[in-house]
């Protein structure tokens, strides 16, 4: 399964890069992002290394895949509203205990270096007795 996820991530990266940049090197209109790691609050025995990839169209639709906190593959799709350096993503995500779950993630671009932006996201706990709140770091271009 691990090898399949890696191959899918590489394939998705290639497709996203090919569609995001024109043949003449135009500036990308869409966003390619990479999930990196998380910190769970309160901390428990969760996986904090969450590699993954996402692609967001300039108009707002977004989709991605990552290794989640309970060591499973998650796939999500939704819509992102952008307000300057602040974003709000809503949608659905798979890979957790109850099938597809609500996705509600506010985030903030922290800083940009050479066209790569570090993004901090807050993922609130959905159920009171299960899980934790999450701070998540991703980079995007």
Image (cartoon, rainbow, N blue to C red):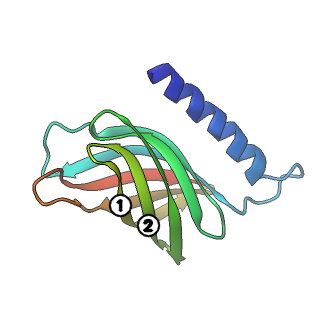
In the picture as drawn, the residue positioned furthest to the bottom comes out as 83
Would you say 59 lies left or right of 104 here? Answer: right
Against 25, residue 73 (above or below) is above
Would you say 25 lies left or right of 57 here? Answer: right
According to the picture, the residue beneath numbered tag 2 turns out to be: 90
Secondary structure at badge 2 equals: strand
Residue nearer the viewer, 7 or 33: 7
Residue 109 in sight here: no
In primary-sequence order, the first of circles 2 and 1 is 2
Against 118, residue 86 (above or below) is below
How far across and down, in percent of the image, does residue 85 sit?
49, 73
Residue at (65, 70) in percent of width and height: 59
How far across and down, in percent of the image, does residue 119 sit?
44, 59
Residue 85 in sight here: yes
Would you say 15 lies left or right of 117 here? Answer: right
Q: How many angstroms separate mark 2 from mark 1 (CA)?
A: 8 Å
According to the picture, the residue beneath numbered tag 1 turns out to be: 102
How far across and down, in percent of the image, does residue 31 sit?
62, 58
Mark 2 and mark 1 in contact? Answer it, CB < 8 Å. yes
């Amino acid at each position: 399964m691990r090898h399949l996820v890696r191959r899918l991530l590489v394939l998705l990266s290639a497709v996203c890069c090919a569609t995001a940049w024109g043949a003449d090197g135009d500036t990308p209109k869409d966003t390619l992002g990479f999930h990196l790691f998380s910190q769970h609050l309160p901390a428990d025995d969760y996986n904090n290394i969450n590699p993954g990839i996402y692609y967001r169209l300039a108009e707002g639709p977004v989709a991605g895949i990552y290794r989640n906190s309970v060591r499973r593959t998650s796939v999500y799709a939704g819509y992102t509203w952008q307000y300057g350096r602040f974003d709000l993503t809503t949608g659905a995500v798979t890979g957790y205990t109850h099938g597809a779950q609500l996705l509600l993630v506010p985030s903030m671009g922290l800083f940009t270096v050479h066209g790569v932006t570090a993004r901090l996201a807050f993922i609130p706990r959905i159920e009171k007795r299960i899980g934790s709140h999450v701070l998540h770091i991703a980079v995007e271009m």
